[in-house]
RNA sequence: GGUCCGGUAGCUCAGUUGGAUAGAGCAUCAGCCUUCUAAGCUGAGGGUCAUUGGUUCGAAUCCAAUCCGGAUCACCA
């Protein structure tokens, strides 16, 4: 249990004993960290009790303060400032805490339990390479899965690949027309990029045909429908659905190129998946669910045979589930996939990492499953995130304004190289080590940049300004970590030395403010990790880690570790920085960010 | 128009179930490297927390209305 929680309980107990017969709701007990301008570590707010107790805040504060100091043994003293009871925790508490936890590599994690959670993320289309917007999705999904794992859940990372449909056929048609048999091998172009190039070529050709037809006198809507290349594409989709051998083998070949490209990108991004779902396998699922829904009477059928659900009672509209010809629409297959996932893994929870433009869709999906009575409905959680936009607006592949993911990685690594060389920090590294370092810094900066903001907020990325390596960045945290490692190296100490190294510690000397601030923060890590899991918000870990690194830097500036005033002080400080580095590594590891020992 | 999300320093963002004088980073300015890594530290300036009203000991936080921005409301995916 965290210290803040312990204090809350102690306060509850104090109120019960001091004022028997008066029911004070535990929710009115607020315990905060004491503001730096006052003495104390944690603060109990007294105002909520005034009315019921009919006493002045300061009087109540004295009674509670006295009780807490005497009965709990946790506190060295208290202080009351205008309605706030500031409690100072005994130094012994902190030294005990450090001795118990400073080298615990699993500090902050929760014990494994049986809750099964799937996190679906990435979920790309196979007609173009990944872009900057996908990166936010991918980092978020990966980080969330890792955070949930650290919270003790059994996690399945899943990827649902959009491998069929009209957009895929567009690339295929364009390839047939213009490629003259080109392959990734022959051109040296990464497979997903090659296919993406033909997707762009399709749109160019299509635009030209539409322009020609409108020039010939057709109105635009008709021209868009009648363009030969579009008709050809629709015909191809029909053939694909009919299982046409030629189309299928082209489809398999081109998707194969894309997968190879994606695999490379995923590997560089440092993310992985436990289960791949393909829409070509799942797009026909869901019809049965709709039939069941019809039988139960929760869905209805129109005269033309189309099937609908009435969601007006939930403040939404009527929604189509099956076309008049009996074919399914997008949401129908999602209904089926939801059930499939549930059955595959007996999920307690199914997290979808999907942009906020699909909020409505996800709401509808969950509602329909609930109406049909599918048990998978309750576990569905939409981790909705804001889209990444450019200063000029949304990225549009048709307008060529997308920031490519592979390019972005290259640029970040180049930036890391440039800045490292500029700072003159390349000495003592082999070329191989340097390359690894640039990758660590560049990729870390990229991930942190996309994870540090509350997911639900949209973000604007300006490629011209690129990404900073100063201030609220992964680099800052990496630097703090490298500094700590440097000290430990000089002390001849491993990153996580055994407890026996520090048994001599005593607490005769008071813990100094800069030390205290750090230890206080270290103690709060489990609560932060828990909050990140409960709120589905990895950005909490970014904020916390940055704060921790900041506290360390100030501490480092103010106090010497290796030349501490006494051996006891030195031990205390070593434990503090060892644990700081440990937590930074732990938190960043969950986000997929590596911390170098030297930089 | 309906539903949902957002509006906090010049810019990008924090701000725990309502708590003390609203905090960081970037940018600007002024300091700090014969001492464990200056990718750092210390300090200064910078705010009508979109607006108005309400709830109360106390509101950036909760409620209502209004304004602004975005998403969405297809027999597309």
Image: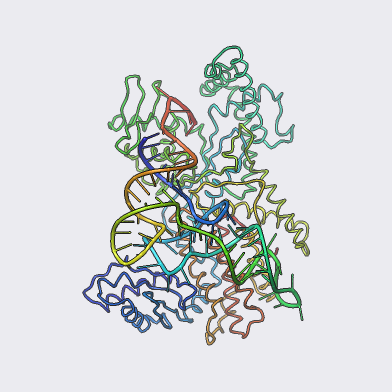
Residue toward you, A18 or A499: A18
Q: Horizontal and vertical percent for residue A170?
A: 59, 26
Who is closer to the viewer here, A87 or A426?
A: A87
Q: Is residue A295 above or below residue A532?
A: above
Using residue B63 as the reference point, say whether residue A397 is left or right of it: right
Task: Point out residue A451 in the picture as x, y percentages from the top left corner.
Answer: 55, 53
Residue at the far bottom in the pictured view: A508
Q: Is residue A360 visible?
A: yes
Q: Is residue A1 in sight in this rendering?
A: no
Which quadrant does the C terminus of chain A fall into? bottom right
* Position of A142 relative to A420 (above/below): above
Task: Name the one closer to the observer, A392 or A168.
Answer: A392
At horizontal 62% and vertical 78% (from top left) the residue drawn is A559
Q: Is residue A385 left or right of residue B30?
A: left
Q: Position of residue B35 (x, y in %)?
A: 72, 77
Residue A118 % position (x, y): 46, 47
Q: Nearer the viewer, residue A220 or A133?
A: A220
Quarter occupied by the N terminus of chain A: bottom left
- The quarter holding residue A581 reads bottom right
Residue found farthest to the left: A21
Q: Residue at x 71, y 52 (%)?
A: A415
Query: How many marks can you see?
Result: 0
The image's colouring method is rainbow
Point 48% across, 68% down: residue? A524
- Please tell me in which quadrant of the rendered image residue A393 appears: top right
Q: Residue at x 46, y 44 (%)?
A: A352
Task: Give the vertical position of A320 relative to A483 (above or below).
Answer: above
């Amino acid at each position: 249990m965290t210290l803040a929680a312990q204090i809350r309980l102690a306060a509850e107990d104090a109120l019960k004993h001091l004022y028997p017969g008066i029911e004070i709701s535990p929710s009115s007990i607020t315990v905060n960290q004491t503001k730096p301008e006052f003495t104390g570590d944690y603060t109990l707010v007294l105002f909520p009790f005034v009315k019921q107790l009919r006493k002045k805040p300061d009087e109540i504060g004295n009674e509670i303060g006295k009780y807490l100091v005497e009965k709990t043994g946790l506190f060295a003293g208290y202080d009351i400032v205008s309605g706030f009871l500031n409690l100072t925790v005994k130094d012994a508490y902190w030294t005990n805490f450090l001795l118990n936890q400073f080298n615990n590599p699993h500090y902050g994690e929760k014990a494994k339990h049986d809750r099964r959670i799937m996190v679906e993320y990435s979920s790309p289309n196979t007609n173009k390479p990944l872009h900057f917007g996908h990166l936010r999705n991918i980092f978020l999904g990966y980080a969330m899965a890792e955070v949930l794992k650290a919270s003790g859940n059994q996690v399945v990372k899943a990827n649902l690949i959009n491998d069929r449909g009209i957009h895929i056929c567009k690339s295929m048609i364009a390839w047939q027309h213009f490629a003259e048999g080109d392959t990734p091998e022959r051109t040296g172009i990464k497979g997903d990029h090659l296919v993406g190039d033909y997707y762009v070529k399709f749109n160019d050709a299509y635009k030209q045909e539409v322009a020609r037809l409108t020039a010939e006198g057709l109105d635009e809507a008709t021209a868009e429908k009648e363009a030969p290349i579009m008709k050809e594409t629709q015909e191809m989709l029909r053939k694909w659905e009919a299982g046409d051998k030629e189309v299928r083998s082209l489809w398999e070949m081109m998707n194969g190129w894309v997968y190879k490209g994606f695999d490379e990108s995923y590997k560089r991004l440092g993310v992985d998946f436990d289960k791949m779902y393909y829409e070509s396998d799942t797009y026909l699922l869901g019809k049965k669910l709709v039939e069941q829904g019809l039988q139960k009477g929760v869905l209805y059928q129109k005269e033309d045979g189309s099937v609908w659900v009435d969601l007006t009672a939930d403040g939404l509209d009527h929604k189509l589930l099956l076309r008049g010809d009996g074919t399914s629409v997008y949401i129908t297959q999602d209904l089926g996939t939801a059930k499939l996932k549930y059955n595959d893994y007996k999920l307690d929870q199914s997290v979808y990492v999907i942009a906020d433009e699909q909020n409505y869709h996800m709401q509808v999906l969950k509602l329909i499953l609930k109406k049909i009575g599918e048990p998978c409905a309750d576990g569905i959680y939409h981790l909705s995130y804001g889209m990444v936009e450019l200063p000029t607006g949304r990225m549009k592949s048709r307008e060529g304004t997308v920031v490519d993911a592979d390019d972005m990685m290259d640029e970040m690594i180049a930036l890391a190289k440039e800045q490292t060389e500029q700072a003159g920090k390349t000495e003592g590294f082999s070329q191989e080590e340097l390359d690894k370092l640039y990758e660590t810094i560049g990729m870390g900066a990229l991930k942190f940049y996309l994870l540090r903001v509350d997911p639900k907020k949209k973000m604007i990325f300006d490629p011209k300004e690129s990404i900073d390596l100063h201030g609220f960045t992964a680099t800052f945290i990496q630097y703090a970590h490298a500094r700590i490692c440097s000290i430990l190296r000089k002390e001849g100490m491993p990153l996580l030395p055994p407890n026996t190294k520090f048994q001599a510690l005593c607490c005769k000397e008071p813990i100094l403010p800069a030390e205290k601030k750090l230890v206080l923060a270290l103690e709060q890590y489990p609560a932060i990790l828990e909050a990140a899991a409960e709120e589905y918000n990895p950005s909490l870990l970014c904020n916390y880690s940055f704060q921790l690194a900041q506290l360390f830097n100030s501490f480092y500036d103010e106090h010497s570790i290796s030349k501490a005033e006494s051996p006891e002080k030195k031990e205390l400080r070593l434990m503090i920085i060892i644990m700081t580095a440990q937590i930074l590594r732990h938190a960043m590891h969950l986000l997929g960010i590596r911390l170098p020992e030297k930089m």
